[in-house]
Image (cartoon, rainbow, N blue to C red):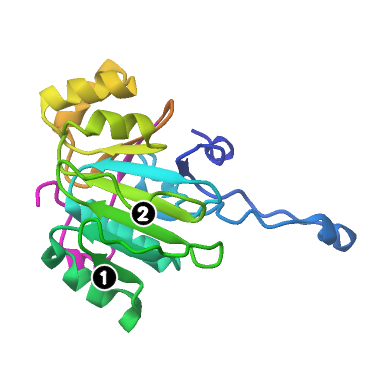
Amino acid sequence: MAASSVRGVRGLFGPRHAGHSVVTDHLGALSLPVGDDGVVIGDDAEGHPQLVGFHRSTPYDVLLIGGLWTAQVLALRAAGTGARVAVETGRAQEWTTLAQSAGAGLECITLHDVGRVPPMGATVGSPVVVVRDCGMRPPRGRVVSSPWQSVLTLLPYLSPVAPRLMRTSTLVGVQRVSPQEAQQIGRILGLHRTETEALPTLADGVTLWCAGSERHWVMTTPTDAETGLLGTARRMD
């Protein structure tokens, strides 16, 4: 996909356009598209960086059927863009080191018990990403997506709530699943047969991201700092 067409994708953003110039008299007519950039989630098959624009003026829900490692990389990178990240989880011990290490001592990633995320007061100047790591059957959250507050829900595998979440989420990511799960996911998301058949064979760190009719195979490669903190990419926790 050409860089010029990636910009309008509902879920993912690709490489930026080349720079433009404008005469000084026209500067007053310009406005900045807040939220037009996002979190780098990895590279596509051509090596182009792919981004998720978490910071939006409209509610934005993301579903990841995959591993904890990928969710933690996304949380860490979201915090790196200046967002406050609230993690709702029943396994705080898996997130403690990450929360303590992020932000150089600042509380940019906070941990909360399931159902105990307080109102975050998201604004354009202080966006929020809520990560829901609540197991196979996450309860309906007290804190939902809203302007400048996106919600990322992690499901380790397909579960009874997955079909509803796949249909209501703007962006869905799928990592390696069983052939049976792949068939059900393929029917719900309208995947091509070759895409469905590829899901059980995906390597660690590879995710198929779906936004409407858009499909992007993305490899998430950790930085040296992320490897030191989280280890190498893995699908299983």
Q: Is residue 222 visible?
A: no
Q: Is residue 67 visible?
A: yes
Residue at x 33% of width, y 19% of height: 190
- Magenta range: 215-237
What amino acid type should be assigned to the residue bearing mark 1?
A: Ala
Q: Quadrant of residue 137?
A: top left
The residue lying toward the viewer, choosing from 162 and 68, is: 162
Q: Quadrant of residue 218?
A: top left
Residue 223 within the segment the image draws in magenta: yes
* Left or right: 211 as drawn, with respect to 185: right
Residue 108, percent from left and from top: 36, 72
Disc 2 crowd rating (10 Å Cα; few below 14, some 14-19, many 20+) is some
Instruction: Determine which of the numbered discs, if any, sits on residue 225 in the image.
Output: 1
The residue lying toward the viewer, choosing from 83 and 104, is: 83
Disc 1 crowd rating (10 Å Cα; few below 14, some 14-19, many 20+) is few
Instruction: Determine which of the numbered discs, if any, sits on residue 141 in the image.
Output: none
Instruction: Name the residue at the right extreme.
Output: 25
Which residue is labeled 2 in the image?
A: 143
Residue 94, percent from left and from top: 13, 63
